[in-house]
Image (cartoon, rainbow, N blue to C red):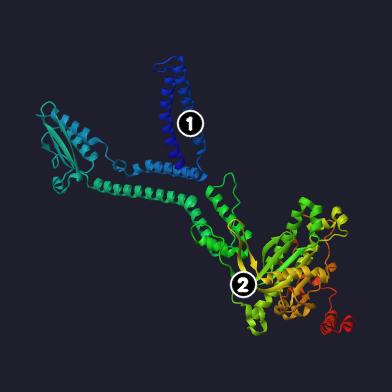
Amino acid sequence: RVGTRLGRILRMVRLLRIFRLYKSWHGVNNPSGGGGEESKAAIRTKKTDTLLDDVAAEVDDDEILRKTEETRVGARLSDLTTRRVVVGVLALLFTLPLFDIHTYDHRTGLETGGLRMLHTAFVAERGTELSDGFFDAVEMYQSQATDMYALVVDGIDFSNHSKTDFTLNRDIGAGLRCEEYQYTTYVSEENGSVSYAFFDMRDASRLKALLNMGRTAFVCFVLGLGAMLFSKDANTLVLKPIERMVKKVREVSENPLKRFEVYDDDDDNKQMETRMLENSIAKICGLLAIGFGEAGSEVIAENMKRGGEINPMIPGKKVVAIFGFCDIRQFTDTTEVLQEGVMEFVNTIGKIVHMEVHLHGGSANKNIGDAFLLVWKFPKQISLADVENPERTTPAKRAVIAEVANNALASFVIIMASLRRSARLDRYRHNPRLNKRMPDFEVKMGFGLHVGWAIEGAIGSEFKVDASYLSPNVNLSARLEAATKQFGVPLLISEEFVRICGERVRAQCRQIDRVTVKGSIEPMGIFTYDTCIEAVPMPAADSDPTISPEDESNSFMHYEDEFTEHPDIVALRQGVSQRFLSQFALGFELYSGGDWERAAQ
């Protein structure tokens, strides 16, 4: 490990410095050379400084050693390796004796000692007739000495003696290899007479060969298992986490908006460095997706794919989308009253806005203090011509366009109701300072919706980059929102947007004027979607102000037709009758034709 090697190198350097310290100390106390006392004092001072520098360097080395702590991954890997080595060695120590031939050799050890006894007894009875006791001893020796095929005592062959009950086949030895037989001899020290016996070791030789093969196979198995376990530990602790990190980076380069799971089940103090690094990559990818948004996906993808330095200034691309702009009412006064608390106020509203837009297929692009820019991009197969002339496109594309437009309008309408129903925002409604500054204070927003093309890309420099959209259509959505104050309605939508909505939703939109906007010579119809905000119930007095917007939202349920089934939209449309819409349409037609008196009636 790097830490261990670095420690060894520093110890060697320390050893060399010990000698330098000794020489320096010796030189301080015994300055050499001529000169007076002042010269010797100067030499002593210089050498003392050198000694202090060496001591300081030694302290620095100690600090480096203390800082070079073993990582959790290294410690875990070292611990597992030590355990497996110990278990493997113990397994070998306890198992290898089972593959030793002596474990299964049933010989009694009588071969040599018994032959000596037979030789001594034979010499004692030499010159006389051998007794029955001697032959009993011979037969006892033959029965105890396994696989004996030849026996000669002092030159007399007892392999096939008439007074013994056994017969030995001496011819067996002719066909045996060296390792297949064994013999034992006894030579008398008195007269040099010799006795010997031969034994057939073929069975033992075969067993020994099998045991050697088994031992080799077992050792190979243990080594292979150890290598596999060591490799498994390295894969689990190091290689697989690295592979997952590389995979995450590759997936982010392909889909910059993808979110990854963050593993937070482990204690941070005990979490492996690889897991911490993997979680950090997942969090960084999540922050990139949040910071850049959908508009910055190309910036992230291009820089993840290419090597070298980061280049955020990549060319933009043309997209077709619905642009929504919303603004918090009375924000300047609210900021002056709330001061530091205005951040929580804005973020609470932002959470509701972003959540509803996201649930309806859109994405948040920019947060500009009290305003939010929201975008609903059409699928790639939808062109600008399809959006500008929906009646000329195919029914399938027309249905997709209408669905995106309906979702955009529904999200803004639901946001109006969510702001009123929010228990957390209800605290500001009862804030005495806000009500003193703005009597009957209530959180309100203005909304504008328009559809068209825009250039999506990075805006800024290498010092600061924002991913956003540039187009007159984006500016037009902001102008529509600003005009809501003049027309006295919370929501204004363009004629181009109304044209792409579904037939039923289009019938519920009310045209309130036709104007020529700044920067354009073509007049544009302005519509609104009527709502009755008082029909939405406010939170109860005992409502929990810490409840999350997710728990308060009604948009997580599935609706076949949101405009007729969603509780918030249904509540907001109370009091808006078809008779009112028809009469207003007739009046607007007179207004457009210049008959203002009849239009007013």
Q: Considering only vertical position in the picture, is 299 above or below 90? A: below
442 relative to 117 in the view: left or right:
right
Q: Quadrant of the C terminus?
A: bottom right
Q: Considering only vertical position in the picture, is 44 above or below 272? A: above
Q: Is residue 550 visible?
A: no
Q: In the rendered image, which residue does mark 2 sit on?
A: 319
| Mark with earlier residue (1, 2) | 1
132 relative to 381 in the view: left or right:
left
517 relative to 102 in the view: left or right:
right
Residue lying farthest to the top in this orientation = 36
Question: Where does residue 3 sit, x and y in percent of width and height?
Answer: 46, 40
Q: Quadrant of the N terminus?
A: top left
* Residue occupying image coordinates x 45% and y 51%: 232
Question: Where does residue 350 sit, x and y in percent of width and height?
Answer: 72, 60
Q: In the rendered image, which residue does mark 1 sit on?
A: 57
> Looking at numbered disc 2 in the image, what kind of residue is underneath it?
Val
Q: Nearer the viewer, residue 59 or 34?
A: 34
User: SS at mark 2?
Assistant: strand
> Looking at numbered disc 1 in the image, what kind of residue is underneath it?
Ala
Question: Where does residue 565 sit, x and y in percent of width and height?
Answer: 76, 73
Q: Nearer the viewer, residue 574 or 96?
A: 574
Q: Nearer the viewer, residue 128 or 242?
A: 242
